[in-house]
């Protein structure tokens, strides 16, 4: 089964200690993406994680 036609406009972004940013994953809804961010935060990850919509930038 291929999801190449799926619309996944929500990204989870991670920023490391050096300011480098990486896309962690793409999700269909903001709520799904936020659950991933929350799970990383709950486990005590040191990096900064946030949710961003494709085409939108926090900078």
Image (cartoon, grey):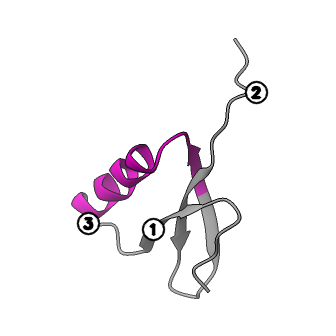
Residue 54 placement, left or right of 37: right
Q: Please check the rendered image and state whether residue 2 is part of the magenta-colored stretch, yes or no.
A: no
Q: Residue furthest left?
A: 42
In the displayed structure, does residue 14 sit left or right of residue 5?
left
| Label 2 neighbour load within 10 Å: few <14, some 14-19, many 20+ | few
Question: Percent from the top left, x then y, of residue 10?
Answer: 56, 52
Q: Which mark is residue 5?
A: 2
Q: Which residue is mark 1?
A: 50
Identify the image quadrant of residue 43. bottom left
Which stretch is magenta? Answer: 24-42
In the rendered image, residue 32, in percent from the top left (x then y), is placed at 41, 43
Q: Residue at 70% across / 24% down in the picture? A: 3
Q: First in sequence, mark 2 or 3: give its number.
A: 2
Q: Measure how far apart labels 1 and 2 are at the Cα level.
A: 25 Å
- Asked if residue 5 lies left or right of residue 58, the reply is right
Helix, strand or loop status at disc 2: loop
Note whether 11 is above or below 55 in the view shown: above
- Give the Cα distance between marks 2 and 3: 34 Å
Mark 3: secondary structure? loop
Q: For mark 3, does the 10 Å Cα neighbourhood hold few (<14), some (14 to 19), or many (20 or more) residues?
A: few
* Nearer to me, 52 or 18: 52
6 displayed left or right of 11: right
| Residue closer to the observer: 21 or 26 | 26
Q: Tell us which disc is closer to us: 1 or 2.
A: 2
Instruction: Determine the CA span between mark 1 and mark 3.
Output: 14 Å
Please name which of the two marks, 2 or 3, marks the residue nearer to the observer. Answer: 2
Q: Earlier in the sequence, mark 1 or mark 3?
A: 3
Q: Quadrant of the C terminus?
A: bottom right
Q: Any mark on residue 44, and which?
A: 3
Instruction: Work out whether mark 1 precedes mark 2 in sequence or the reverse, and give the earlier one.
Output: 2
Task: Tell me where residue 56 sits by quadrant.
Answer: bottom right
Residue at 26% x, 66% y is 44
């Amino acid at each position: 089964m291929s999801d190449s036609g799926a619309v996944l406009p929500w990204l989870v972004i991670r920023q490391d200690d050096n300011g480098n940013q990486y896309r962690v994953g793409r999700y269909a809804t903001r709520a799904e993406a936020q659950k991933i961010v929350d799970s990383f935060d709950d486990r005590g990850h040191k990096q900064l994680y946030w949710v961003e919509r494709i085409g939108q930038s926090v900078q």
